Amino acid sequence: MEYELGEQTEHRLKEMGARCVGETLDVEYYYDTDSFQLASTQTWLNQHNGQWGLILAEEQELNHTLSYNTKKLEVGHSEEKQSKILNTLEEKSETGVAFRETPSNEFPEKVMSKSQVQRTSSDSSLTYTELSDPCSIMLHLSKCLQLPLTHNEMQSMTMKNFLNMARIQMYDSWTRTSTIKYSLPGGFSLVVERDYRIPAETATALLMMNADVLSISSELEKMDRLCKELGLKPKASSDG
């Protein structure tokens, strides 16, 4: 049966000596230059499950030979990623403008802030395009950053080498979902699942046990007592 975590559930897990025996994270990583050159042109580079993706505004010009590698994104999906990136930019500077560290004989360079990026993207439509082929991504980025690379050079280049040459680095990550498994005394185990893509979604808990089928009634009573001790609440049905 599925449950929702109570306010004291995690505290009570520690009190009863529960051990974390496994954790799985679904993480998305975001990349840009140190001055956020990509974000300033409404371009976002990300990596998820080992797959690269380059999201760009519909009005940007694409090489027609790459059209088969593109796909349209749903509005909610693109807005979710854009919102996450803009929030990260805001955290870089409380004043709205961040500065990149430079040697003492140079003037600091202004970095694209959240407000600047919002102004840049305010006139764009809600339709975005995503490139998923590494070669297509490198070709578009080399054009965006004005890198002196030929198509043949990029075909034999790995994404890692390209990012190093272009001085593109990971600047943030976002955990989409997490699954944590706890081992509890008495042969019980608890699996806690969180979906951070849904802000108001409460963590889901699955309580399991190695039950004696010959004493199933008493075993279920043990589980019921443990649920109350942990403060777990039956998950409301989403039907209706």
Image (cartoon, rainbow, N blue to C red):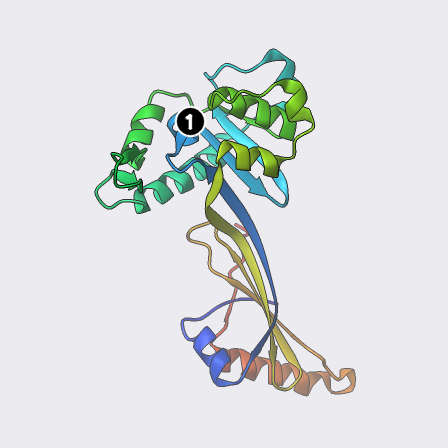
Examine the rendering and report whether any part of residue 134 can be seen.
yes
Examine the rendering and report whether any part of residue 133 can be seen.
no
Residue at image x 67%, y 84%?
Answer: 219
Q: Is residue 146 above or below residue 159?
A: above
Numbered disc total: 1
Q: Is residue 178 above or below residue 41?
A: below
The amino acid sitting under disc 1 is: Gln
Residue 74 horizontal side relative to residue 151, left or right: left
**Quadrant that contains the N terminus:** bottom right
Q: Is residue 86 above or below residue 26?
A: above
| Residue position for label 1 | 42
Q: Residue furthest right?
A: 214
The image position of residue 74, as x and y in percent, is: 52, 30
Residue at image x 54%, y 30%?
Answer: 54
Residue at image x 53%, y 20%?
Answer: 148
Could you say which is closer to the camera, residue 210 or residue 24?
24
Q: Residue furthest top?
A: 64
The image position of residue 73, as x and y in percent, is: 54, 29
The image position of residue 21, as x and y in percent, is: 62, 73
Residue at image x 63%, y 39%?
Answer: 51
Q: Secondary structure at mark 1?
A: loop
